[in-house]
Each structure stands twice: as C-alpha cells, then as structure tokens.
Image (cartoon, rainbow, N blue to C red):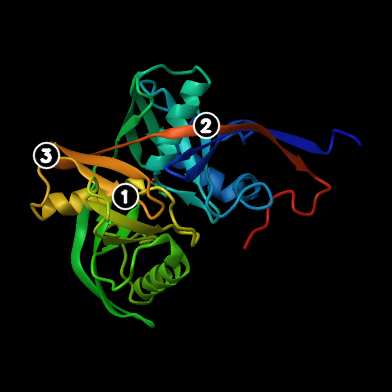
C-alpha cells in the first residue's frame, strides 16, 4: 500500500471532567500568523473538512472538542488556540483550555505557573498548579438579558437569562426537569427545543450572535456542591464537564443578583458528577470568572487521513 495517499495529523487527547479535548499538535493547516480571530475565520472558511476529519466519526464523536494549537499573535502568550466541535468553531472553551494546558505540560512545553493563552475572543490566563489542577481566568463575562420568556414546543413557557461567558448561554432555573444522567435524552430534547424557540423568536446575544449553548440548573445532591447543570452544546452533544464558559456565565448572573461576592467560591457539578470550582474577580467594572478543574491525558496518536477513504474527512451531518 502506498504511503502517498496518507496525510498524518498528530493529536493528544485528554478529558476534563469527562469531556474530551483533542489537541492538534502537528499536521494542521497553515493559517498564517495573523490575529487569532482572523485565523479562525480562515479555518472555518477553507478548512472545515479538516475540522470534521479530526473530531467527527469515525475518528471522533459528537462530544469531542478539537483544539488547534497555534503560534500566538501576542508575544506574551505561551500558545494560541482555535477550538472547534462537530459542527463548527466555538469561540472559547474552558474545559478545552484546561485540557490544552495539561497537554502542553505533558509535552514538557510548560511548567507549573501562570500562562497566557490567546483565543479568538481574547487572552485568558491559565495557572497550572503543582497539584496538576488548572485555573482559567476567563474572558470578561456578563449577563446581557434577564427573565427572557419563550414558549417551548412540548415544554410550555420557559424563563431564562442570557449571559456571555466566552460563548452565549441561555440559563434556566425553573424547567421542571430532573437533572440525572438517566434522563439525558429528554434533557437533550428539552434544551434543543429551547434553542429552536430562541431562534424562532429572534432572541440573540447582545452582540447579535446566536445563543448556541443552553444550560439548565438544579440543586446538587452533593453537600460539597452548590448546583448541578446540564449543558447542551451547539452540535446537540451535552457537555460531560460542568462547562467552564457556562459556569462563567452562571457566575456573572450570580454576581449580578448579589448572590455571590468577589472571591466567594461556587462548586458547579456536571450531569456526570464532575466538578469545577468558580469564583469571580472584579477588575474595574468587569467580571472575570476564575474556573478551576483538572484534566488527564489519555492518548497520543497519529490520525491517518487516507485520500482513498470515502470517509477521510469524517461523517458530516
Ligand atoms: O468548558 O467552556 C467549556 C465548554 C464549551 C463547550 C464545551 N465545553
């Protein structure tokens, strides 16, 4: 068999609280060295099949978040990254940043300490602790709209807040659902219909972007946790982790409601039982969420893209 038909892509896989991250460390497309936002546009426009090849079946799954490791534009940063999933690019990803930092440490590219990471929506600061845990000081987060009502097919009137945590979220407290792993199908149906209702009614984030993450909350049965969530991601997969950008959006809402003070901790449990610890730092009039979690590297691999393979670029829905 000739090797000429094979393209090799080196990846390192990890999971953060159960949610997978696949970091592309070599073999990705050349996007130049412009600002990360511009490189993300180019990646979306010209290399969408590469995105699909890396994260979609048969090599990946709907839950995998890809992270294209890039040289940063800002010289003070340790790395740049473009995150993507089963349907496209995502703005920011905290579980993915935690996975990236643990991956860079695994590659011996960074040691414990503070590292600036450049993303298409801004620079975040990640601290790799000696314990192996990672704290991400995320992009400034805020609540954009409070008490937004939508009529959801099959579920009735649902009220939620719209908040930015690096992605746009619709956060719902009162939904009548039991947040248990055994109910994933129903929770997926409910959150997907909420998203459709938002789209139907033209409800968008404050900058006009689509609200593509839906987040349900309930009390946690665990004494050491403040809340449990279920987060539906843009490609209809649910987040196995507590979703760091979603936790950031939640922290911004709690702070706005006077339910969380600066520095006070919030333990956010995911639907699979993993936990992120959150707190806010106030800088001027900005809310900076800090989210702490841990990740484990579980594979070093070379993906082979065979031009003779009808599914070389993955199965695209
Ligand atoms: O942790 O921010 C996050 C995230 C976004 C989508 C999946 N995980």
- Residue at 38%, 30% in the rendered image: 117
Residue sitting at x 67%, y 57%: 315
Question: In the shown orientation, is residue 269 left or right of residue 232?
Answer: left
Q: Return the residue found at the far right.
A: 1
Q: Is residue 35 among what the camera can see?
A: no
Which of the two labelled residues, at mark 1 and mark 3, occupies the earlier sequence position? 3
Task: Name the image quarter holding residue 129.
Answer: top left
Label 2: few (<14), some (14–19) or many (≥20) C-alpha neighbours in 10 Å: some
**Do the CB atoms of the residues marked 1 and 2 lie less than 8 Å apart?**
no
Q: Secondary structure at mark 1?
A: strand
Q: Nearer the viewer, mark 2 or mark 3?
A: 2
Q: Position of residue 102 (x, y in %)?
A: 45, 28
User: Residue 80 versus residue 253: which sits nearer the camera?
Assistant: 253
Residue denoted by label 2: 297
Who comes first in sequence, dot 1 or dot 2? 1
Which residue is drawn at the image coordinates 27% and 40% (left, top)?
Answer: 277
Pointer 1 and pointer 3: residues touching (CB < 8 Å)? no
Please tell me in which quadrant of the rendered image residue 263 appears. Answer: top left
**Does the beta carbon of the residue at mark 2 sit less than 8 Å from ligand 1?**
no
Q: Residues within 10 Å of mark 1 (few under 14, many from 20)?
A: many
Query: Label 1: which residue?
Result: 269
Counting from the top left corner in percent of width and height, residue 116 is at 35, 26
Instruction: State which quarter of the image contains the C terminus.
Output: bottom right
Number of other residues with Cα within 10 Å of mark 3, as a class: few under 14, some 14 to 19, many 20 or more: few
Q: CA distance from mark 1 to mark 2?
A: 21 Å
Instruction: Work out which quarter of the rendered image holds the N terminus and state it.
Output: top right
| Tag 3 secondary structure | loop
Q: Dots 2 and 3: beta carbons under 8 Å?
A: no
Instruction: Determine which of the numbered discs, if any, sits on residue 262 in the image.
Output: 3
Nearer the camera: disc 1 or disc 3:
1
The vertical placement of 201 against 28, above or below, is: below
- The yes-or-no answer for disc 1 within 8 Å of ligand 1 is no
């Amino acid at each position: 068999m000739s090797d000429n038909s094979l393209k090799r892509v080196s990846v390192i896989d990890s999971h953060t609280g159960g949610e997978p991250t696949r970091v592309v460390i070599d073999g990705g497309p050349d996007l130049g060295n412009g600002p990360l936002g511009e490189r993300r546009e180019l990646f979306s426009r010209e290399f969408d099949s590469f995105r699909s090849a890396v994260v979609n079946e048969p090599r990946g799954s709907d839950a995998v978040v890809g992270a294209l490791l890039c040289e940063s534009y800002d010289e003070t940063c340790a790395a740049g990254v473009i995150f993507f999933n089963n349907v496209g690019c995502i703005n920011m990803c905290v579980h993915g940043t935690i996975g990236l930092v643990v991956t860079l440490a695994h590659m011996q590219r960074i040691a414990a300490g503070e590292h600036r990471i450049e993303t298409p929506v801004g620079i975040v600061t990640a601290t790799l602790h000696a314990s192996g845990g990672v704290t991400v000081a995320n992009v400034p987060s805020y609540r954009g709209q409070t008490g937004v009502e939508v009529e959801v097919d099959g579920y009735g009137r649902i009220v939620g807040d719209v908040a930015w945590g690096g992605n746009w979220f619709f956060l719902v407290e009162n939904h009548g659902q039991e947040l248990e792993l055994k109910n994933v199908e129903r929770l997926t149906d409910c959150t997907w219909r909420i998203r459709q209702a938002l789209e139907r009614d033209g409800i968008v984030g404050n900058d006009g972007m689509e609200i593509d993450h839906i987040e349900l909350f309930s009390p946690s049965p665990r004494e050491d946790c403040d809340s449990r969530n279920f987060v539906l991601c843009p490609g209809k997969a649910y987040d196995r982790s507590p979703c760091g950008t979603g936790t950031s959006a939640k922290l911004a809402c709690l702070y706005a409601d006077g339910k969380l003070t600066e520095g006070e901790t919030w333990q956010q449990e995911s639907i699979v039982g993993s936990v992120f610890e959150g707190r806010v730092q106030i800088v001027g009039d900005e809310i900076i969420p800090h989210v702490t979690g841990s990740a484990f590297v579980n594979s070093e691999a070379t993906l082979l893209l065979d031009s003779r393979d009808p599914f070389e670029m993955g199965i695209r829905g």
